[in-house]
Image: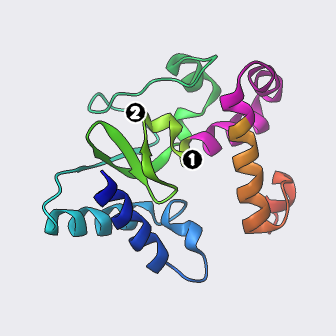
């Protein structure tokens, strides 16, 4: 797995110099393809996985702490997921998680989308989750760091007007 991590890190380092975050936030499908073919050329067996507004039965999805997949569907989180990533040895990888994580909801993209949707449409529920679970507090911090780096603000209304 160290070989895959090194390959992901090397591919990330060469990705879009103007906006390297695109490797996991905007160009994730292209990034996953690039790593997949490079890994296969090195003899690594892995899979590309993805969601486009709907979970499917082919991948194990475990809801983050304090909620359920049904609740996330009800809150509109699942219908807003759009991401591609790699699976190897039961772990999930993308440009933001080159060492791999245990579940798709541990990938930064999933964490940020969940917080973004809850922050906009269910702020009271997000406040409770953040108060009770480190996962949600850390996910909110990840989203804020991303927004500041990309847009210079965490104000979603102002960002939408850009």
Label 1, label 2: how far apart the Cα atoms are: 17 Å
**Extreme front residue here?**
2
Name the residue: 83% across, 23% down: 124
**Residue 47 x, y percent position in the rendering:** 23, 49
**Residue 101 x, y percent position in the rendering:** 45, 40
Label placed on residue 55: 2
Residue 121 inside the magenta-drawn segment: yes
- Which class describes the residues within 10 Å of circle 1: few (<14), some (14-19), or many (20+)? many
Question: Image quadrant of residue 159?
Answer: bottom right
Name the residue: 46% across, 66% down: 27
The residue mark sitting in front, 1 or 2, is: 1
Q: Nearer the viewer, residue 39 or 53?
A: 39
Name the residue: 16% across, 52% down: 45
Report the number of numbered marks. Answer: 2
Disc 2, SS: loop
Residue 5, placed above or below residue 77: below
Q: Earlier in the sequence, mark 1 or mark 2?
A: 2
Label placed on residue 147: none
Question: Image quadrant of residue 103?
Answer: top left
Residue 66 inside the magenta-drawn segment: no
Residue 2, placed above or below residue 69: below
Question: Image quadrant of residue 77?
Answer: top right
User: Which quadrant of the rendered structure holds the C terminus?
Assistant: bottom right
Q: Nearer the viewer, residue 129 or 138?
A: 138
Disc 1, SS: helix
- Which class describes the residues within 10 Å of circle 2: few (<14), some (14-19), or many (20+)? some
Residue 29 relative to residue 135: left or right: left
Q: Nearer the viewer, residue 77 or 95?
A: 95
Q: Main secondary structure of the magenta part?
A: helix
The segment highlighted magenta reads 111-137
Check disc 1 and report the residue beneath it. Answer: 108
**Extreme bottom residue here?**
17
């Amino acid at each position: 797995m160290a070989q895959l991590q090194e390959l992901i890190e090397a591919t990330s380092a060469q990705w879009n110099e103007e906006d390297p975050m695109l490797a996991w936030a905007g160009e994730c499908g292209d990034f996953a393809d690039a790593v997949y073919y490079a890994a296969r050329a090195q003899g690594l067996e892995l899979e590309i996985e993805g969601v486009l507004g709907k979970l499917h039965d082919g991948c194990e999805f475990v809801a983050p702490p304090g909620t359920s997949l049904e609740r996330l569907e009800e809150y509109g989180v699942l219908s807003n997921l759009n991401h591609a990533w790699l699976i190897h040895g039961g772990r999930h990888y993308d440009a933001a998680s080159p060492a791999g994580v245990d579940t798709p909801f541990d990938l930064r993209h999933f964490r940020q989308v969940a917080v973004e949707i809850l922050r906009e449409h269910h702020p009271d529920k997000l406040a409770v989750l953040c108060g009770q679970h480190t996962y949600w507090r850390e996910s909110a911090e990840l989203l804020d760091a991303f927004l500041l780096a990309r847009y210079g603000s965490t104000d979603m209304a102002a960002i939408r007007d850009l």
